[in-house]
Image: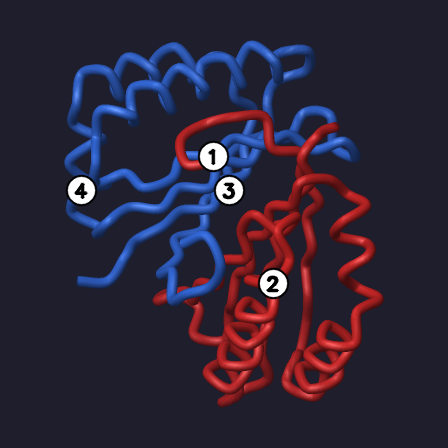
Chain colours: A red, B blue
Amino acid sequence: MDRFGMNVKFTAKAGQRDALVQILLGAATAMEAIPECEKYMISVSDSEPDTIWVNEIWNDAGAHKASLDQEATKASIQQAMPLIAGVEAFQIRPVGGKGL
Amino acid sequence: MDRFGMNVKFTAKAGQRDALVQILLGAATAMEAIPECEKYMISVSDSEPDTIWVNEIWNDAGAHKASLDQEATKASIQQAMPLIAGVEAFQIRPVGGKGL
């Protein structure tokens, strides 16, 4: 089964980046209980002050899809939505490298 | 010291994606000898057949910069250049999450 990943670039509404980071860190903590989620890493950008990147890697696409139906995920999304100005999501298929 | 990362989206010249993936996997193998490089993960995209993503995480920005001066890195870049049609590079500062 191929791994599945997402590189997601969020643009927060002005002044809301750090609040959005906190929600995403909470979502990442919830992912600790989901072994099929290998990585859910949150980064900011020093050159784009409203930008947040989430880099996710999953055992397979089905596990990612199933997570979207979980109550904890739905609650995080509902909390995050009012803080988000834009989303660019890139679906990826990890093939190898260091730390995978 | 803050971690340092790069999310890099390569567009390969037509028909050259898999050759470029092999060069990047070779670069990732060289990174195994560099403890300051925590992750150097290579992915493709099923929806964009010429796209390759590299997600890099380093102990700090200085270690990343030093790696660019190493002979192995320079050789990889020289091999890869003729296969690359475009590059978008996003500098990131990892702040937390699962698998970091």
The mark tally for this picture is 4
Which residue, given by chain and number where applicable, does mark 2 sit on? A33
Q: Between disc 4 and disc 3, whose residue precedes?
A: 4
Return the x and y of residue B37 as percentages of the image width and height: 28, 38
User: Residues at marks 2 and 4, common chain?
Assistant: no
Give neighbour class at mark 1: few <14, some 14-19, many 20+ (Cα, 10 Å).
many
Q: Between disc 4 and disc 1, whose residue precedes?
A: 1
User: Residues at marks 2 and 3, common chain?
Assistant: no
Given residues B78 and A42, the one toward you in this image is A42
Q: Is residue B7 above or below residue B22?
A: below
- Disc 4 vs disc 1: which is toward the camera? 1
Which residue, given by chain and number where applicable, does mark 3 sit on? B88
Q: Secondary structure at mark 3?
A: strand
Return the x and y of residue A81 as percentages of the image width and height: 72, 82
What residue is drawn where x is 70% and y is 33%?
B45
Which residue, given by chain and number where applicable, does mark 4 sit on? B63
Q: Amino acid at mark 2?
A: Ala
Q: Is residue A57 left or right of residue A67?
A: left
- Disc 2 vs disc 3: which is toward the camera? 2
Q: Amino acid at mark 4?
A: Ala
Q: CA distance from mark 4 to mark 3?
A: 21 Å
Callout 3 touching callout 1 (CB < 8 Å): no
Q: Secondary structure at mark 4?
A: helix
What residue is drawn where x is 51% and y is 67%?
A52
Given residues B29 and B51, the one toward you in this image is B29
Given residues B76 and A73, the one toward you in this image is A73
Q: Amino acid at mark 1?
A: Met
Which residue, given by chain and number where applicable, does mark 1 sit on? B41
